[in-house]
Image (cartoon, grey):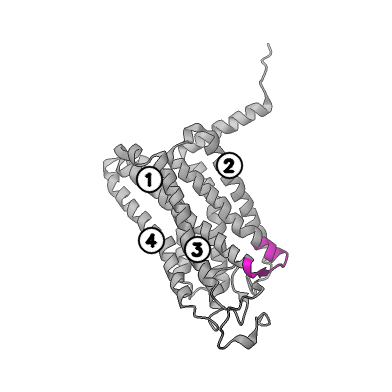
């Protein structure tokens, strides 16, 4: 794809910003039969969509789940739907149907929405961690510290807080000139591979700085907070029933591990990981947590399982109708 270049006559002494009409998303290279992998991602996306929609319906319908904790759970399910929708349909369109060219504006929009909802996922896990921290370490103050109002404020702050790092990243891209290769070595308009295309023609130092700063703010600091909260929870376990505490926290710990571990490994070892392996890792990290989150909550949260069973029985009874007894 070396023929995909912009104006080569303006590689030196650039005084105007060169914005190409399109980019080319390379995706995987040199791996046969990748269409089966894309079909697998489509299957995962459908399960994710159905599972998270089911979670949101249960929480909305069952008034017993209208508690502060489930405001955060509902927000997580909504974010999972948005995040997987921002990636998978476009990915399938590009690689299953050979539409790997993407316009400049569409590329920036794709970059914005993918990273915005990834950031929201991370912030949602912080909110759930805070809820568990207060519930176990300060049980007598739980209903004072964790209220509907405070939870709405936290989720609202998470939505607005997710905007700023992503807007800065996208804004810094708009100041770059792309005068050479237009091939993005990723499966979407990934921030790192995108701004590095402008390195021969523009000063990308601000982009490099933000590429290190954003993961710290969005992934590493939240992960440190969550680990710290569970250290406090572990300390509190000596005064409460161990079994009850594990049941309370296990679902959230599973979500944290599913989301943070692959991303952390990828970012820390990105210079050592081959491009294809990095793409597989990040694409699975983007689609598997949204699919597994509702499964984890259905299987691990007792009150949610009871609410789901009640709703299913109610729907089944309405579908079947009243059963008449015969003597």
Residue 327 falls inside the magenta stretch: no
Q: Secondary structure at mark 3?
A: helix
Say whether disc 3 or disc 2 marks the residue closer to the N-terminus. Answer: 2
Say whether disc 3 or disc 1 marks the residue closer to the N-terminus. Answer: 1
Say whether disc 4 or disc 1 marks the residue closer to the N-terminus. Answer: 1
Residue 321: which numbered mark, if any? none
**C-alpha span from label 2 to label 4:** 31 Å
| Residue at 48% over, 66% down | 168
**Residue 302, percent from left and from top:** 46, 37
Residue 221: which numbered mark, if any? 4
Residue 54: which numbered mark, if any? 2
| Residue at 37% over, 54% down | 226
**Which residue of the protein is positioned furthest toward the top in this rendering?**
327
Q: Secondary structure at mark 2?
A: helix
**Residue 220, percent from left and from top:** 40, 62
Residue 12 vs 94, above or below: the answer is: below
**C-alpha span from label 4 to label 1:** 18 Å
Q: Residues at badges 3 and 4 in contact (C-beta under 8 Å)?
A: no
Can you identify the residue that label 1 sits on? 132
Say whether disc 3 or disc 4 marks the residue closer to the N-terminus. Answer: 3
Can you identify the residue that label 3 sits on? 166
Residue 100 falls inside the magenta stretch: yes
Residue 244 vs 322, above or below: the answer is: below
**C-alpha span from label 3 to label 4:** 16 Å
Quadrant of the image for the C terminus? top right
**Residue 139, percent from left and from top:** 31, 39
**C-alpha span from label 1 to label 2:** 23 Å
């Amino acid at each position: 794809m070396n023929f995909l270049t912009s104006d080569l006559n303006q590689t030196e002494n650039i005084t105007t910003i060169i914005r190409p009409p399109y980019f080319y998303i390379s995706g995987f290279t040199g791996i046969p039969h990748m269409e089966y992998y894309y079909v697998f991602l489509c299957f995962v996306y459908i399960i994710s969509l159905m599972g998270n929609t089911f979670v949101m319906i249960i929480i909305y319908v069952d008034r017993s789940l209208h508690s502060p904790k489930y405001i955060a759970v509902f927000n997580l399910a909504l974010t999972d739907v948005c995040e997987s929708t921002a990636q998978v349909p476009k990915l399938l369109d590009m690689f299953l149907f050979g539409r790997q060219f993407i316009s400049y504006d569409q590329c920036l929009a794709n970059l914005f929405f993918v990273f915005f909802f990834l950031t929201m996922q991370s912030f949602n896990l912080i909110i759930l961690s805070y809820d568990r921290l207060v519930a176990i370490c300060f049980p007598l103050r739980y209903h004072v510290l964790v209220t509907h109002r405070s939870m709405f404020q936290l989720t609202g702050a998470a939505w607005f807080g997710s905007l700023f790092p992503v807007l800065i990243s996208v804004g810094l891209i708009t100041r770059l000139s792309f005068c050479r290769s237009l091939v993005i070595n990723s499966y979407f308009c990934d921030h790192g591979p995108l701004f590095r295309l402008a390195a021969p023609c523009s000063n990308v130092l601000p982009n490099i700085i933000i590429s290190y700063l954003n993961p710290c703010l969005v992934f590493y600091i939240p992960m440190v907070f969550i680990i710290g909260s569970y250290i406090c929870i572990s300390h509190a376990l000596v005064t409460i029933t161990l079994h009850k505490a594990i049941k309370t926290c296990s679902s959230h710990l599973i979500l944290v591990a599913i989301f943070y571990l692959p991303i952390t490994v990828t970012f820390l070892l990105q210079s050592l990981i081959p491009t294809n392996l990095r793409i597989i890792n990040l694409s699975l990290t983007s689609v598997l947590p949204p699919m597994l989150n509702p499964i984890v909550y259905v299987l691990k949260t007792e009150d949610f399982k009871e609410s789901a069973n009640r709703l299913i029985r109610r729907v089944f009874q309405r579908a079947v109708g009243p059963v008449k007894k015969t003597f």
